[in-house]
Image: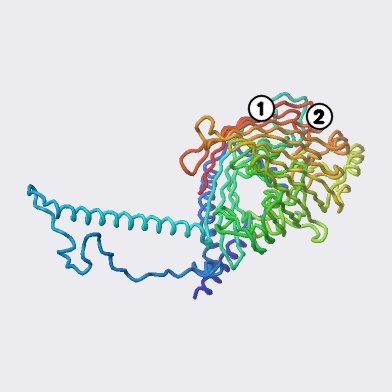
Amino acid sequence: MAKSAAKEGRLYLWYRLTYRCNAQSVPPRQRQHTVPVSDRDQQGVHLLLSRLAVSLILIIAESGLLLIGFAVPVGTCFAQEGPPQDVVRLPSVPNPPQPGLDANATSDQKVPKLPEPGAAAKPEAGSKGDQAESATKEKKEKEKDKEEDKDKKDNEDEKAAPQCSNFHAQATTVAQGDPGFPAQYSGPNSLNPAGERQGTVAADLFAGIRLWHGAEMHADALMWQGFGLSNTFGVEDFPSGDAFKIGTEIPDFMLARWFVRQTFGFGGEQEDVPDGQLTLRGKQDISRLTLTVGRFTPTDVFDNNSYAHDAHTQFLNWAAVANLAWDYPADSIGFTTGISLELNQPQWALRYGWFQMPGEMNGLTAEDQIFCWPGSGSDGNFWRSWGMMTEFERRYKLDEHPGALRLMAWLDSADFASFAVATPILIANPPTPPIPPGAGITIPPEAFAYRYKYGFGINWEQELSKTVGVFSRVGWNDGHEAAWTYTDANWSVSWGASIKGARWHRPDDTVGVLGVVSGASPEQIAFLKAGGTGILNGDGNLTYSPEKALELYYDFPIGKTAHFALDYQFVGDPAFNADRGPVSIFGVRLHWEE
């Protein structure tokens, strides 16, 4: 019966996902150019509200099906991790005789009667009564201590027991705006110099389940709505990690993650695994091999940093989410299918990953036709459209303060556009205005061909005290080909610090400061001067200067499950152009998770 219900749940889930994703198919280049509409008629407002309600209902229902369709009996994972210990109950033992009393005496003889109120107590009887009362009180205190110890041990055992399944949710709203800035000219992919205000909403429902010993399955249902500044164009160190390259007026839905993680332990010392959005509570061997297969993002495994990695709770800038020079394989939202291997040891780790590239520049992948709504996308040639990376992590301590150094190298293959081929064609045949915004919108078709590109990155973090940590990233790529998935930066250096508020008696508050400098290769500079457009840049002309960015944020809790942050960012020479900017960007963020 349980197997039948699980099968029906999986079939229904597949049907709903397939139906929704094929209900509307919009080419990715058209969708990314959608311009927000300021004046909606009454019918448009009704359509927006109705689709928003339907989207939220289906997200909740389908996430529930993930739990139901793949559910296993609750006790199964405990049996897989190790048989539960039987509770041994000892037979009751008669109370020991009290001092000064005959063990064979009757009950009335053992416990003297207390004198009536106001009556004079007999010295001898009173002495025996006090002894009995003191012994009884001591016995009750011991029994109470035993009960407290037992409850404490039960709670510890419950926390230590492997978790069979979990369910988490998060929602993040970001609002940003700038008052405008000076610009000598603008192009199709320029940041709007007149100033603007934009906002985004992103919500995730996470479900995890333990399959068998060492194996977990996790799913993440994502809903997003809104636009980044200028439709996420015009800045390489883009100021909002939740501003996806595909903006939308009406909420879109995606099964962003759906993967299986298998851990092979080698024995020895163990460490705790927390109950998290993508982890199940339990223990695992520190010496282990972890295999992850399915749909996720490379940044789930690679280029992690304790102080700068999560735009929902830390810095908003893209340079703090991942290495700007790493054009990592992913669709326009940041996810794709792939496989990763991680060998972990007490002081180091070695990782390798292979992931599928989308078939178009800044496009969606083939599985997005099934796992998103509205659905579209394609993969390139399977054997020629991929990205692989390897990372070595060395962990250490300085005066008992932990630190880590990560060295990464990557190699990508896809239908890349060559700057050396595209630039002469643009000079001979300049693009004819008006040119609509779009990733690579002016790149001539002759410039595309299957090519390789490679790069290297360094990721460092160091705790200075229990409340202060510092970090840095350095990245470089060969700079011969146009960006395909992330940013146009060919090199980047970032550094920063994260400070907890314990010194001003607010230990849950966080102050963060980030500095970034990024630049372009000589080939890309010539390409942009000729009127070329990249994945984020394209001002129609260029006076080159490296882009500089600064971010400062203050995050504080609201209740037990929500946080609010104030954010300021300064960008000089946006999109490598000294003829534009600087610009100040102000923002707020509200984050909730459970």
Q: What residue type is disc 1 on?
A: Ser
Outermost residue, left direction? Answer: 119
Q: Is mark 2 on a helix, strand or loop?
A: loop
Is 516 or 473 nearer to us in this picture?
473
Residue drawn at x 79%, y 30% as measured from the top left: 577
Q: Quadrant of residue 131?
A: bottom left
Q: Residue 584 carries which label?
A: 1
- Percent across and percent down for residue 526 are 88, 35
Residue drawn at x 26%, y 56% as measured from the top left: 135
Q: Can residue 46 be seen by looking at this rendering?
A: yes
Q: Which mark is residue 545?
A: 2
Q: Can residue 262 be seen by looking at this rendering?
A: no
In 3D space, how far apart are the residues under numbered discs 2 and 1 (Cα atoms)? 18 Å
Is 155 or 432 nearer to us in this picture?
155
Q: What residue type is disc 2 on?
A: Ser
Q: In which quarter of the image is residue 350?
A: bottom right
Mark 2 crowdedness (10 Å alpha carbons): few <14, some 14-19, many ≥20: some
In this image, 348 relative to 9: left or right?
right
Residue drawn at x 52%, y 44% as measured from the top left: 592
First-in-chain label (2 vs 1): 2
- Percent across and percent down for residue 369 are 67, 58
